[in-house]
Image (spheres, rainbow, N blue to C red):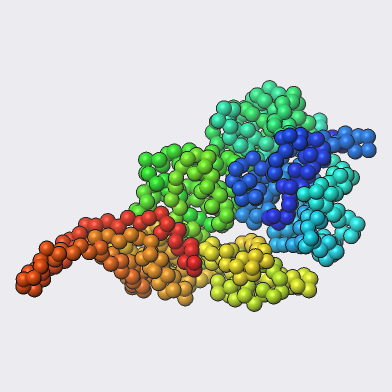
Amino acid sequence: MKNIRNFCIIAHIDHGKSTLADRMLQTTGTISDRDMQEQALDDMDLERERGITIKSHAIQMDYEYQGENYKLNLIDTPGHVDFSYEVSRSIAACEGALLIVDASQGIEAQTISNLYLALEHDLEIIPVLNKMDLPGAEPEEVTDQIVELIGCEIDDVIPASGKTGMGVEKILAAVVDRVPSPSGNPDAPLQAMIFDSVFNPFRGIIAYYRVMNGSLAKGEKVQFVNTGKSYTADEIGILKMKPVQKKQINTGDVGYIISGIKQAKEVKVGETITTLENPCEEAVQGFEDVKPMVFAGIYPVDTDDFEELRYSMEKLQLNDSSLVFEPEASAALGFGFRCGFLGMLHMEIIQERLEREFNMTVITTVPNVSYFCYMKKDPEEQIIVNNPSELPDPAGVEYIEEPFIKAQVITKSEYVGPVMNLCIEKRGELQNQVYLTQDRVELTFHMPMAEIVFDFYDRLKSVSRGYASFDYFPIGYQQSDLVKVDVLLNHEQVDALSALVHRSNAFDLGKQICNKLKELIPRQQFEIPIQAAIGAKIIARETIKALRKDVTAKCYGGDISRKRKLLEKQKQGKKRMRQVGKVEVPQEAFLAVLKLND
Protein backbone atom coordinates (compact mmCIF):
# COMPACT_ATOMS: atom_id res chain seq x y z
CA MET A 1 0.00 0.00 0.00
CA LYS A 2 2.89 2.37 0.70
CA ASN A 3 3.76 2.32 -3.03
CA ILE A 4 0.34 3.47 -4.24
CA ARG A 5 -0.30 7.13 -5.13
CA ASN A 6 -3.76 8.45 -6.07
CA PHE A 7 -3.79 11.90 -7.66
CA CYS A 8 -5.85 14.01 -10.07
CA ILE A 9 -5.10 16.89 -12.41
CA ILE A 10 -7.01 20.15 -11.93
CA ALA A 11 -6.83 23.34 -14.00
CA HIS A 12 -8.82 25.97 -15.84
CA ILE A 13 -10.17 24.95 -19.26
CA ASP A 14 -7.46 24.86 -21.97
CA HIS A 15 -4.43 24.97 -19.67
CA GLY A 16 -3.08 21.68 -21.06
CA LYS A 17 -4.20 18.99 -18.56
CA SER A 18 -4.93 16.27 -21.12
CA THR A 19 -1.72 16.93 -23.09
CA LEU A 20 0.35 16.65 -19.91
CA ALA A 21 -1.50 13.44 -18.99
CA ASP A 22 -0.58 12.07 -22.46
CA ARG A 23 3.13 12.74 -21.80
CA MET A 24 2.92 10.98 -18.41
CA LEU A 25 1.36 7.91 -20.03
CA GLN A 26 4.19 7.83 -22.57
CA THR A 27 6.95 8.42 -20.01
CA THR A 28 5.71 5.57 -17.78
CA GLY A 29 5.23 3.26 -20.80
CA THR A 30 1.48 2.86 -20.09
CA ILE A 31 0.71 3.53 -23.73
CA SER A 32 2.91 2.58 -26.69
CA ASP A 33 3.98 5.23 -29.21
CA ARG A 34 2.04 3.34 -31.87
CA ASP A 35 -1.27 3.68 -29.96
CA MET A 36 -0.59 7.27 -28.95
CA GLN A 37 -3.02 9.95 -30.08
CA GLU A 38 -3.90 13.46 -28.90
CA GLN A 39 -5.99 13.49 -25.68
CA ALA A 40 -5.40 9.74 -25.20
CA LEU A 41 -7.68 9.55 -22.15
CA ASP A 42 -10.62 11.33 -23.79
CA ASP A 43 -12.63 8.57 -25.44
CA MET A 44 -15.58 10.61 -26.74
CA ASP A 45 -15.52 12.04 -30.29
CA LEU A 46 -17.13 15.15 -28.89
CA GLU A 47 -14.20 15.73 -26.51
CA ARG A 48 -11.66 15.52 -29.34
CA GLU A 49 -13.63 17.77 -31.68
CA ARG A 50 -14.02 20.53 -29.11
CA GLY A 51 -10.64 19.93 -27.46
CA ILE A 52 -12.23 19.80 -23.99
CA THR A 53 -12.56 17.09 -21.36
CA ILE A 54 -16.17 16.33 -20.42
CA LYS A 55 -15.71 13.19 -18.29
CA SER A 56 -13.10 12.39 -15.64
CA HIS A 57 -10.90 9.48 -16.72
CA ALA A 58 -9.02 7.17 -14.38
CA ILE A 59 -5.92 5.18 -15.38
CA GLN A 60 -3.18 3.27 -13.54
CA MET A 61 0.50 3.80 -14.40
CA ASP A 62 3.51 1.76 -13.23
CA TYR A 63 6.53 3.91 -12.43
CA GLU A 64 9.99 2.96 -11.22
CA TYR A 65 11.65 5.52 -8.95
CA GLN A 66 14.91 5.05 -7.02
CA GLY A 67 14.82 1.28 -7.48
CA GLU A 68 11.23 0.84 -6.26
CA ASN A 69 8.07 0.20 -8.27
CA TYR A 70 5.13 2.52 -7.67
CA LYS A 71 1.50 2.34 -8.78
CA LEU A 72 0.22 5.78 -9.77
CA ASN A 73 -3.55 6.13 -10.17
CA LEU A 74 -4.18 9.25 -12.24
CA ILE A 75 -7.60 10.87 -12.75
CA ASP A 76 -7.75 13.49 -15.53
CA THR A 77 -10.59 15.96 -14.86
CA PRO A 78 -12.56 18.52 -16.91
CA GLY A 79 -11.71 22.22 -16.63
CA HIS A 80 -14.97 23.95 -17.54
CA VAL A 81 -17.12 25.42 -14.74
CA ASP A 82 -20.12 23.35 -15.93
CA PHE A 83 -18.34 20.09 -15.14
CA SER A 84 -17.06 20.98 -11.69
CA TYR A 85 -19.19 18.15 -10.26
CA GLU A 86 -16.95 15.64 -12.10
CA VAL A 87 -13.96 17.36 -10.50
CA SER A 88 -15.43 17.14 -6.98
CA ARG A 89 -15.96 13.37 -7.36
CA SER A 90 -12.43 12.80 -8.63
CA ILE A 91 -11.01 14.82 -5.75
CA ALA A 92 -12.90 12.66 -3.24
CA ALA A 93 -11.04 9.59 -4.57
CA CYS A 94 -7.52 11.11 -4.33
CA GLU A 95 -4.82 12.15 -1.85
CA GLY A 96 -3.02 14.64 -4.08
CA ALA A 97 -3.63 17.00 -6.97
CA LEU A 98 -1.52 18.54 -9.71
CA LEU A 99 -2.56 22.18 -10.05
CA ILE A 100 -1.71 23.17 -13.61
CA VAL A 101 -1.40 26.81 -14.63
CA ASP A 102 -0.74 28.04 -18.16
CA ALA A 103 2.49 30.11 -18.20
CA SER A 104 1.10 32.44 -20.86
CA GLN A 105 -2.39 33.00 -19.35
CA GLY A 106 -1.76 32.93 -15.61
CA ILE A 107 -4.28 32.05 -12.91
CA GLU A 108 -7.94 32.09 -13.99
CA ALA A 109 -11.27 31.83 -12.14
CA GLN A 110 -11.70 28.07 -12.49
CA THR A 111 -8.12 27.47 -11.28
CA ILE A 112 -9.05 29.13 -8.00
CA SER A 113 -12.38 27.36 -7.48
CA ASN A 114 -10.90 23.92 -8.28
CA LEU A 115 -8.04 24.66 -5.90
CA TYR A 116 -10.50 25.44 -3.08
CA LEU A 117 -12.29 22.14 -3.79
CA ALA A 118 -9.00 20.28 -3.41
CA LEU A 119 -8.03 22.15 -0.23
CA GLU A 120 -11.40 21.30 1.37
CA HIS A 121 -10.46 17.61 1.02
CA ASP A 122 -6.95 18.23 2.45
CA LEU A 123 -5.20 17.16 -0.75
CA GLU A 124 -1.47 17.67 -1.24
CA ILE A 125 -1.16 20.31 -3.99
CA ILE A 126 1.71 20.13 -6.49
CA PRO A 127 1.81 23.35 -8.59
CA VAL A 128 2.92 22.91 -12.22
CA LEU A 129 3.68 25.73 -14.65
CA ASN A 130 2.67 24.36 -18.06
CA LYS A 131 3.26 25.54 -21.67
CA MET A 132 6.77 26.82 -20.92
CA ASP A 133 7.68 26.34 -24.62
CA LEU A 134 5.30 29.09 -25.80
CA PRO A 135 6.88 32.37 -26.93
CA GLY A 136 4.26 34.29 -24.89
CA ALA A 137 5.10 32.49 -21.61
CA GLU A 138 5.77 34.71 -18.57
CA PRO A 139 7.21 32.22 -16.06
CA GLU A 140 8.41 34.70 -13.39
CA GLU A 141 5.15 36.62 -13.25
CA VAL A 142 2.90 33.52 -13.19
CA THR A 143 5.13 31.75 -10.63
CA ASP A 144 4.67 34.76 -8.34
CA GLN A 145 0.87 34.46 -8.80
CA ILE A 146 0.98 30.74 -7.85
CA VAL A 147 3.20 31.37 -4.80
CA GLU A 148 0.81 34.10 -3.65
CA LEU A 149 -2.26 31.89 -4.18
CA ILE A 150 -1.04 28.67 -2.54
CA GLY A 151 1.58 30.04 -0.17
CA CYS A 152 4.29 27.60 -1.35
CA GLU A 153 8.00 28.22 -2.10
CA ILE A 154 9.17 29.29 -5.56
CA ASP A 155 11.18 26.03 -5.86
CA ASP A 156 8.00 23.96 -5.33
CA VAL A 157 6.58 25.11 -8.67
CA ILE A 158 7.60 22.68 -11.44
CA PRO A 159 8.12 24.22 -14.91
CA ALA A 160 6.82 21.85 -17.61
CA SER A 161 5.56 21.59 -21.15
CA GLY A 162 2.95 19.05 -22.23
CA LYS A 163 3.98 19.46 -25.86
CA THR A 164 7.74 18.88 -25.56
CA GLY A 165 7.63 16.62 -22.49
CA MET A 166 9.81 18.95 -20.42
CA GLY A 167 9.50 18.47 -16.64
CA VAL A 168 7.36 15.29 -16.81
CA GLU A 169 9.96 13.18 -14.94
CA LYS A 170 10.10 15.88 -12.24
CA ILE A 171 6.29 15.83 -11.89
CA LEU A 172 6.21 12.02 -11.51
CA ALA A 173 9.02 12.19 -8.92
CA ALA A 174 7.16 14.95 -7.05
CA VAL A 175 3.97 12.80 -6.99
CA VAL A 176 5.93 9.94 -5.38
CA ASP A 177 7.75 12.22 -2.92
CA ARG A 178 4.99 14.64 -1.92
CA VAL A 179 1.64 12.82 -2.26
CA PRO A 180 0.91 10.64 0.79
CA SER A 181 0.15 6.94 0.26
CA PRO A 182 -3.47 5.90 0.99
CA SER A 183 -4.39 5.53 4.64
CA GLY A 184 -6.72 2.61 5.17
CA ASN A 185 -6.97 -0.61 7.11
CA PRO A 186 -6.42 -3.69 4.88
CA ASP A 187 -7.90 -5.98 7.58
CA ALA A 188 -11.11 -4.00 8.11
CA PRO A 189 -14.40 -4.95 6.34
CA LEU A 190 -14.56 -3.83 2.70
CA GLN A 191 -15.51 -0.19 2.21
CA ALA A 192 -15.24 1.22 -1.33
CA MET A 193 -16.68 4.37 -2.88
CA ILE A 194 -18.09 4.50 -6.42
CA PHE A 195 -16.90 7.66 -8.19
CA ASP A 196 -18.07 6.90 -11.73
CA SER A 197 -20.02 4.39 -13.82
CA VAL A 198 -20.50 3.59 -17.51
CA PHE A 199 -23.00 1.49 -19.44
CA ASN A 200 -21.80 -1.38 -21.61
CA PRO A 201 -24.53 -2.89 -23.85
CA PHE A 202 -23.07 -6.42 -23.39
CA ARG A 203 -21.92 -6.46 -19.76
CA GLY A 204 -24.42 -4.10 -18.11
CA ILE A 205 -23.20 -1.37 -15.80
CA ILE A 206 -19.50 -1.06 -14.99
CA ALA A 207 -18.81 0.86 -11.78
CA TYR A 208 -15.46 2.51 -11.00
CA TYR A 209 -14.56 2.71 -7.32
CA ARG A 210 -11.76 3.50 -4.89
CA VAL A 211 -11.17 1.01 -2.04
CA MET A 212 -10.97 2.89 1.27
CA ASN A 213 -10.63 -0.10 3.65
CA GLY A 214 -10.42 -3.87 3.26
CA SER A 215 -10.17 -5.74 -0.05
CA LEU A 216 -12.48 -7.13 -2.73
CA ALA A 217 -12.01 -10.60 -4.27
CA LYS A 218 -13.49 -11.94 -7.51
CA GLY A 219 -16.74 -13.91 -7.04
CA GLU A 220 -17.51 -12.34 -3.64
CA LYS A 221 -21.05 -11.28 -2.76
CA VAL A 222 -21.14 -7.48 -2.48
CA GLN A 223 -23.79 -5.13 -1.16
CA PHE A 224 -24.52 -1.50 -2.05
CA VAL A 225 -25.08 0.29 1.26
CA ASN A 226 -27.58 2.99 0.23
CA THR A 227 -29.86 0.86 -1.97
CA GLY A 228 -29.35 -2.28 0.14
CA LYS A 229 -29.15 -4.51 -2.96
CA SER A 230 -26.61 -7.31 -3.26
CA TYR A 231 -24.73 -8.66 -6.30
CA THR A 232 -21.90 -11.00 -7.19
CA ALA A 233 -18.57 -9.53 -8.27
CA ASP A 234 -18.40 -11.39 -11.62
CA GLU A 235 -15.32 -9.52 -12.78
CA ILE A 236 -13.02 -7.06 -11.03
CA GLY A 237 -9.86 -5.40 -12.19
CA ILE A 238 -7.77 -2.27 -12.60
CA LEU A 239 -7.97 0.48 -15.21
CA LYS A 240 -5.12 0.62 -17.73
CA MET A 241 -5.72 1.87 -21.28
CA LYS A 242 -7.97 -1.18 -21.44
CA PRO A 243 -9.44 -2.83 -18.29
CA VAL A 244 -7.15 -5.53 -16.83
CA GLN A 245 -8.78 -8.38 -14.86
CA LYS A 246 -7.48 -9.15 -11.33
CA LYS A 247 -8.30 -11.73 -8.65
CA GLN A 248 -8.26 -9.15 -5.85
CA ILE A 249 -8.30 -5.36 -5.40
CA ASN A 250 -6.69 -4.11 -2.19
CA THR A 251 -6.92 -1.04 0.05
CA GLY A 252 -6.04 2.24 -1.65
CA ASP A 253 -6.51 0.89 -5.17
CA VAL A 254 -8.79 2.20 -7.89
CA GLY A 255 -10.64 -0.46 -9.90
CA TYR A 256 -13.79 -1.51 -11.72
CA ILE A 257 -16.52 -4.07 -10.97
CA ILE A 258 -18.94 -5.82 -13.33
CA SER A 259 -21.83 -7.53 -11.58
CA GLY A 260 -24.52 -7.79 -14.25
CA ILE A 261 -26.52 -4.74 -13.08
CA LYS A 262 -28.93 -3.74 -15.83
CA GLN A 263 -30.99 -0.99 -14.15
CA ALA A 264 -29.45 2.47 -14.31
CA LYS A 265 -31.05 3.68 -11.08
CA GLU A 266 -29.44 0.90 -8.99
CA VAL A 267 -26.01 2.51 -9.23
CA LYS A 268 -25.62 5.94 -7.67
CA VAL A 269 -22.33 7.78 -7.83
CA GLY A 270 -21.10 8.27 -4.27
CA GLU A 271 -22.52 4.86 -3.28
CA THR A 272 -20.53 2.63 -0.91
CA ILE A 273 -19.75 -1.02 -1.75
CA THR A 274 -19.21 -3.56 1.04
CA THR A 275 -19.30 -7.36 1.35
CA LEU A 276 -22.52 -9.17 2.23
CA GLU A 277 -20.91 -11.46 4.83
CA ASN A 278 -18.87 -8.84 6.66
CA PRO A 279 -20.42 -5.40 5.99
CA CYS A 280 -18.75 -2.13 7.04
CA GLU A 281 -20.46 -0.12 9.76
CA GLU A 282 -20.98 3.12 7.87
CA ALA A 283 -21.02 4.46 4.33
CA VAL A 284 -18.18 6.61 2.99
CA GLN A 285 -19.00 10.30 3.34
CA GLY A 286 -18.47 11.19 -0.29
CA PHE A 287 -20.15 14.20 -1.84
CA GLU A 288 -23.56 15.81 -1.75
CA ASP A 289 -26.18 15.53 -4.47
CA VAL A 290 -25.68 17.82 -7.42
CA LYS A 291 -27.79 21.00 -7.62
CA PRO A 292 -28.82 21.82 -11.18
CA MET A 293 -28.58 25.48 -12.15
CA VAL A 294 -30.32 25.67 -15.52
CA PHE A 295 -33.61 23.99 -16.43
CA ALA A 296 -34.89 23.31 -19.94
CA GLY A 297 -37.44 21.01 -21.54
CA ILE A 298 -36.20 18.29 -23.89
CA TYR A 299 -38.88 16.87 -26.20
CA PRO A 300 -38.72 14.21 -28.93
CA VAL A 301 -39.48 15.58 -32.40
CA ASP A 302 -41.88 12.68 -32.87
CA THR A 303 -44.14 12.10 -29.82
CA ASP A 304 -43.98 8.30 -30.37
CA ASP A 305 -40.28 8.38 -29.40
CA PHE A 306 -41.03 9.42 -25.81
CA GLU A 307 -40.17 6.01 -24.25
CA GLU A 308 -37.07 5.74 -26.42
CA LEU A 309 -35.96 9.16 -25.15
CA ARG A 310 -36.52 8.10 -21.52
CA TYR A 311 -34.35 5.02 -22.11
CA SER A 312 -31.58 7.13 -23.69
CA MET A 313 -31.67 9.69 -20.86
CA GLU A 314 -31.33 6.96 -18.21
CA LYS A 315 -28.27 5.54 -19.99
CA LEU A 316 -26.79 9.01 -20.28
CA GLN A 317 -27.44 9.74 -16.60
CA LEU A 318 -25.25 6.76 -15.68
CA ASN A 319 -22.36 8.28 -17.52
CA ASP A 320 -23.13 11.81 -16.34
CA SER A 321 -24.70 11.78 -12.90
CA SER A 322 -25.13 15.56 -12.83
CA LEU A 323 -28.05 15.28 -15.28
CA VAL A 324 -31.43 15.46 -13.51
CA PHE A 325 -34.75 14.93 -15.32
CA GLU A 326 -38.47 14.32 -14.76
CA PRO A 327 -41.36 13.89 -17.22
CA GLU A 328 -43.53 16.87 -18.20
CA ALA A 329 -46.07 17.73 -20.88
CA SER A 330 -46.43 20.85 -23.00
CA ALA A 331 -49.44 21.97 -25.02
CA ALA A 332 -47.21 22.94 -27.94
CA LEU A 333 -44.71 20.06 -27.91
CA GLY A 334 -46.46 17.04 -26.37
CA PHE A 335 -44.67 14.77 -23.88
CA GLY A 336 -41.05 15.30 -22.91
CA PHE A 337 -38.73 15.83 -19.95
CA ARG A 338 -37.86 18.75 -17.72
CA CYS A 339 -34.09 18.51 -17.31
CA GLY A 340 -31.70 20.18 -14.90
CA PHE A 341 -28.18 21.05 -16.09
CA LEU A 342 -25.14 22.57 -14.42
CA GLY A 343 -24.86 25.27 -17.08
CA MET A 344 -25.31 26.16 -20.73
CA LEU A 345 -22.32 24.16 -22.06
CA HIS A 346 -23.56 21.13 -20.13
CA MET A 347 -26.96 21.49 -21.79
CA GLU A 348 -25.40 21.76 -25.24
CA ILE A 349 -23.22 18.67 -24.66
CA ILE A 350 -26.18 16.58 -23.42
CA GLN A 351 -28.23 17.51 -26.47
CA GLU A 352 -25.35 16.62 -28.78
CA ARG A 353 -24.68 13.31 -27.01
CA LEU A 354 -28.35 12.33 -27.30
CA GLU A 355 -28.16 12.92 -31.03
CA ARG A 356 -24.83 11.14 -31.56
CA GLU A 357 -24.88 8.23 -29.15
CA PHE A 358 -28.60 7.41 -29.23
CA ASN A 359 -29.76 8.87 -32.60
CA MET A 360 -32.41 10.94 -30.80
CA THR A 361 -33.39 14.20 -32.52
CA VAL A 362 -34.77 16.45 -29.80
CA ILE A 363 -36.29 19.91 -29.39
CA THR A 364 -34.91 21.97 -26.50
CA THR A 365 -37.00 24.76 -24.98
CA VAL A 366 -35.77 28.07 -23.60
CA PRO A 367 -33.61 27.43 -20.51
CA ASN A 368 -34.64 28.97 -17.19
CA VAL A 369 -34.05 28.61 -13.44
CA SER A 370 -36.40 27.59 -10.63
CA TYR A 371 -38.26 30.21 -8.56
CA PHE A 372 -40.08 30.22 -5.21
CA CYS A 373 -43.58 31.65 -5.29
CA TYR A 374 -45.55 32.74 -2.18
CA MET A 375 -49.34 33.16 -2.32
CA LYS A 376 -51.49 35.84 -0.60
CA LYS A 377 -53.89 33.38 1.00
CA ASP A 378 -51.08 31.38 2.64
CA PRO A 379 -47.81 33.38 2.75
CA GLU A 380 -46.06 30.50 4.57
CA GLU A 381 -46.59 28.05 1.70
CA GLN A 382 -43.74 27.90 -0.79
CA ILE A 383 -44.50 26.83 -4.36
CA ILE A 384 -41.52 25.79 -6.49
CA VAL A 385 -41.86 27.00 -10.09
CA ASN A 386 -39.47 25.22 -12.49
CA ASN A 387 -41.28 26.30 -15.62
CA PRO A 388 -42.89 29.72 -16.34
CA SER A 389 -46.11 28.00 -17.44
CA GLU A 390 -46.48 26.56 -13.89
CA LEU A 391 -46.74 30.05 -12.35
CA PRO A 392 -50.07 30.46 -10.50
CA ASP A 393 -52.48 33.30 -11.35
CA PRO A 394 -50.54 36.57 -10.74
CA ALA A 395 -53.54 38.09 -8.91
CA GLY A 396 -53.08 35.63 -6.02
CA VAL A 397 -49.28 35.88 -5.83
CA GLU A 398 -47.83 37.78 -2.84
CA TYR A 399 -44.21 37.81 -4.09
CA ILE A 400 -41.67 35.71 -6.03
CA GLU A 401 -38.10 34.90 -5.02
CA GLU A 402 -35.37 34.06 -7.53
CA PRO A 403 -31.95 32.39 -7.04
CA PHE A 404 -28.92 34.68 -6.74
CA ILE A 405 -25.29 33.79 -7.33
CA LYS A 406 -21.94 35.19 -6.35
CA ALA A 407 -20.07 35.67 -9.60
CA GLN A 408 -16.29 36.06 -9.78
CA VAL A 409 -14.80 37.51 -12.95
CA ILE A 410 -11.04 37.71 -13.44
CA THR A 411 -9.98 39.98 -16.30
CA LYS A 412 -7.28 42.35 -17.51
CA SER A 413 -7.53 45.83 -16.00
CA GLU A 414 -8.24 47.50 -19.39
CA TYR A 415 -11.55 45.59 -19.69
CA VAL A 416 -12.89 46.43 -16.20
CA GLY A 417 -15.27 49.13 -17.56
CA PRO A 418 -17.05 47.01 -20.22
CA VAL A 419 -17.27 44.00 -17.84
CA MET A 420 -18.83 46.16 -15.11
CA ASN A 421 -21.33 47.64 -17.58
CA LEU A 422 -22.35 44.16 -18.69
CA CYS A 423 -22.82 42.92 -15.11
CA ILE A 424 -24.81 46.00 -14.08
CA GLU A 425 -27.00 45.63 -17.18
CA LYS A 426 -27.67 42.07 -15.98
CA ARG A 427 -28.88 43.46 -12.60
CA GLY A 428 -25.58 42.65 -10.87
CA GLU A 429 -24.30 44.53 -7.80
CA LEU A 430 -20.56 45.00 -7.44
CA GLN A 431 -19.36 43.60 -4.10
CA ASN A 432 -15.61 43.70 -4.37
CA GLN A 433 -12.73 44.58 -6.68
CA VAL A 434 -9.25 43.20 -6.03
CA TYR A 435 -6.09 43.70 -8.08
CA LEU A 436 -4.35 40.28 -8.13
CA THR A 437 -1.39 41.76 -10.04
CA GLN A 438 -0.88 45.14 -11.77
CA ASP A 439 -3.03 44.22 -14.76
CA ARG A 440 -5.28 41.42 -13.46
CA VAL A 441 -8.45 42.29 -11.54
CA GLU A 442 -10.91 40.06 -9.72
CA LEU A 443 -14.45 41.50 -9.68
CA THR A 444 -17.10 39.98 -7.41
CA PHE A 445 -20.80 40.54 -8.13
CA HIS A 446 -24.10 39.38 -6.66
CA MET A 447 -26.50 38.81 -9.52
CA PRO A 448 -29.65 36.82 -10.40
CA MET A 449 -28.97 33.35 -11.81
CA ALA A 450 -31.62 33.90 -14.50
CA GLU A 451 -29.55 36.69 -16.07
CA ILE A 452 -26.53 34.48 -16.76
CA VAL A 453 -28.59 31.63 -18.21
CA PHE A 454 -29.06 33.44 -21.50
CA ASP A 455 -26.20 35.04 -23.37
CA PHE A 456 -24.09 36.28 -20.45
CA TYR A 457 -21.09 34.02 -21.02
CA ASP A 458 -20.82 34.78 -24.76
CA ARG A 459 -21.13 38.51 -24.19
CA LEU A 460 -18.56 38.45 -21.38
CA LYS A 461 -16.07 36.85 -23.77
CA SER A 462 -16.76 39.43 -26.48
CA VAL A 463 -16.53 42.55 -24.26
CA SER A 464 -13.22 41.32 -22.80
CA ARG A 465 -11.87 39.97 -26.13
CA GLY A 466 -11.71 36.51 -24.57
CA TYR A 467 -9.60 37.62 -21.60
CA ALA A 468 -12.22 37.26 -18.85
CA SER A 469 -12.70 34.03 -16.93
CA PHE A 470 -15.88 33.43 -15.00
CA ASP A 471 -16.94 31.28 -12.07
CA TYR A 472 -20.00 31.33 -9.83
CA PHE A 473 -21.72 29.64 -6.90
CA PRO A 474 -25.26 30.02 -5.47
CA ILE A 475 -25.90 32.23 -2.42
CA GLY A 476 -29.65 31.69 -1.88
CA TYR A 477 -32.95 33.26 -2.92
CA GLN A 478 -34.01 36.92 -2.89
CA GLN A 479 -37.32 38.67 -3.53
CA SER A 480 -37.66 40.26 -7.00
CA ASP A 481 -40.31 42.08 -9.03
CA LEU A 482 -40.87 39.41 -11.67
CA VAL A 483 -43.55 39.13 -14.34
CA LYS A 484 -44.46 36.37 -16.76
CA VAL A 485 -44.22 37.32 -20.43
CA ASP A 486 -46.40 35.14 -22.68
CA VAL A 487 -46.02 34.83 -26.43
CA LEU A 488 -49.22 34.58 -28.51
CA LEU A 489 -49.19 33.37 -32.11
CA ASN A 490 -52.43 33.98 -33.96
CA HIS A 491 -54.01 34.71 -30.50
CA GLU A 492 -52.94 31.26 -29.18
CA GLN A 493 -50.45 31.08 -26.33
CA VAL A 494 -47.25 29.09 -26.98
CA ASP A 495 -46.32 27.80 -23.53
CA ALA A 496 -42.81 26.74 -24.57
CA LEU A 497 -41.87 30.39 -25.30
CA SER A 498 -43.08 31.89 -21.97
CA ALA A 499 -40.44 33.54 -19.79
CA LEU A 500 -40.28 34.93 -16.25
CA VAL A 501 -38.40 38.22 -16.35
CA HIS A 502 -37.82 41.30 -14.23
CA ARG A 503 -40.48 43.95 -14.82
CA SER A 504 -37.89 46.49 -16.01
CA ASN A 505 -36.76 44.15 -18.83
CA ALA A 506 -40.21 42.88 -19.85
CA PHE A 507 -41.01 45.46 -22.58
CA ASP A 508 -37.62 45.17 -24.28
CA LEU A 509 -37.69 41.39 -24.16
CA GLY A 510 -41.24 41.25 -25.53
CA LYS A 511 -40.29 43.53 -28.44
CA GLN A 512 -37.14 41.54 -29.22
CA ILE A 513 -38.91 38.16 -29.15
CA CYS A 514 -41.64 39.43 -31.50
CA ASN A 515 -39.06 40.79 -33.94
CA LYS A 516 -37.04 37.56 -33.87
CA LEU A 517 -40.09 35.35 -34.41
CA LYS A 518 -41.19 37.51 -37.31
CA GLU A 519 -37.90 36.67 -39.05
CA LEU A 520 -38.05 32.95 -38.28
CA ILE A 521 -41.68 31.90 -38.79
CA PRO A 522 -42.48 31.26 -42.47
CA ARG A 523 -45.31 33.24 -44.08
CA GLN A 524 -48.68 31.51 -44.43
CA GLN A 525 -51.75 32.05 -46.62
CA PHE A 526 -53.17 34.21 -43.81
CA GLU A 527 -51.93 37.07 -41.66
CA ILE A 528 -50.30 35.99 -38.35
CA PRO A 529 -50.14 38.41 -35.42
CA ILE A 530 -47.27 37.78 -32.97
CA GLN A 531 -47.92 39.32 -29.57
CA ALA A 532 -46.08 39.49 -26.25
CA ALA A 533 -48.34 39.88 -23.22
CA ILE A 534 -48.16 40.31 -19.46
CA GLY A 535 -51.43 38.81 -18.24
CA ALA A 536 -54.14 40.36 -20.44
CA LYS A 537 -52.04 43.40 -21.39
CA ILE A 538 -50.34 43.27 -24.80
CA ILE A 539 -46.90 44.88 -24.58
CA ALA A 540 -45.55 44.27 -28.10
CA ARG A 541 -46.85 43.18 -31.48
CA GLU A 542 -45.50 42.28 -34.91
CA THR A 543 -47.47 40.99 -37.90
CA ILE A 544 -46.38 38.41 -40.46
CA LYS A 545 -48.08 39.48 -43.69
CA ALA A 546 -50.09 36.91 -45.64
CA LEU A 547 -48.87 35.42 -48.88
CA ARG A 548 -51.19 36.95 -51.40
CA LYS A 549 -52.40 35.40 -54.61
CA ASP A 550 -53.37 37.85 -57.36
CA VAL A 551 -57.02 36.86 -57.90
CA THR A 552 -57.68 39.86 -60.15
CA ALA A 553 -55.22 38.67 -62.81
CA LYS A 554 -58.01 37.30 -65.00
CA CYS A 555 -59.89 40.65 -64.99
CA TYR A 556 -58.48 42.76 -67.77
CA GLY A 557 -60.38 45.96 -68.35
CA GLY A 558 -64.01 46.15 -67.29
CA ASP A 559 -65.59 47.72 -64.25
CA ILE A 560 -63.64 48.24 -60.97
CA SER A 561 -66.55 46.72 -59.02
CA ARG A 562 -65.73 43.28 -60.51
CA LYS A 563 -62.22 43.45 -59.07
CA ARG A 564 -63.55 44.73 -55.74
CA LYS A 565 -65.98 41.78 -55.55
CA LEU A 566 -63.16 39.25 -56.09
CA LEU A 567 -60.97 40.92 -53.46
CA GLU A 568 -63.81 40.96 -50.91
CA LYS A 569 -64.37 37.25 -51.55
CA GLN A 570 -60.66 36.58 -51.02
CA LYS A 571 -60.72 38.63 -47.80
CA GLN A 572 -63.53 36.43 -46.41
CA GLY A 573 -61.56 33.30 -47.27
CA LYS A 574 -58.43 34.62 -45.53
CA LYS A 575 -60.51 35.43 -42.44
CA ARG A 576 -61.88 31.90 -42.26
CA MET A 577 -58.47 30.41 -42.92
CA ARG A 578 -57.03 32.39 -40.03
CA GLN A 579 -59.62 30.97 -37.64
CA VAL A 580 -58.78 27.34 -38.43
CA GLY A 581 -55.14 27.83 -39.46
CA LYS A 582 -52.42 26.37 -37.25
CA VAL A 583 -49.05 28.07 -37.09
CA GLU A 584 -46.11 25.65 -37.21
CA VAL A 585 -43.25 26.93 -35.06
CA PRO A 586 -39.81 25.84 -36.35
CA GLN A 587 -37.19 24.44 -33.93
CA GLU A 588 -34.96 27.53 -34.40
CA ALA A 589 -37.69 29.76 -32.97
CA PHE A 590 -37.57 28.00 -29.57
CA LEU A 591 -33.84 28.68 -29.29
CA ALA A 592 -34.06 32.15 -30.87
CA VAL A 593 -34.72 33.71 -27.49
CA LEU A 594 -31.16 32.77 -26.49
CA LYS A 595 -29.63 34.73 -29.32
CA LEU A 596 -31.71 37.90 -29.16
CA ASN A 597 -28.68 40.19 -29.29
CA ASP A 598 -27.18 38.70 -32.45
Furthest-right residue in this view: 66
> Between 595 and 236, which is closer to the camera in this rendering?
595
Could you tell whether 563 is left or right of 251 in the image? left
Vertical order, 553 against 262 (above or below): below
> Between 161 and 34, which is closer to the camera in this rendering?
34
Residue at (44, 55) in percent of width and height: 365
Q: Position of residue 524 (x, y in %)?
A: 27, 60
Could you tell whether 260 is left or right of 554 in the image? right
Residue at (61, 54) in percent of width and height: 82
Vertical order, 536 against 314 (above or below): below
Residue at (22, 64) in percent of width and height: 548
> Between 201 and 223, which is closer to the camera in this rendering?
201
Q: Position of residue 7 (x, y in %)?
A: 78, 44
Q: Position of residue 363 (x, y in %)?
A: 43, 50
Q: Is residue 365 visible?
A: yes
Vertical order, 269 against 234 (above or below): below
Q: In the figure, residue 277 lies in which quadrant?
A: top right
Residue at (65, 35) in percent of width and height: 207
Furthest-front residue in this view: 557
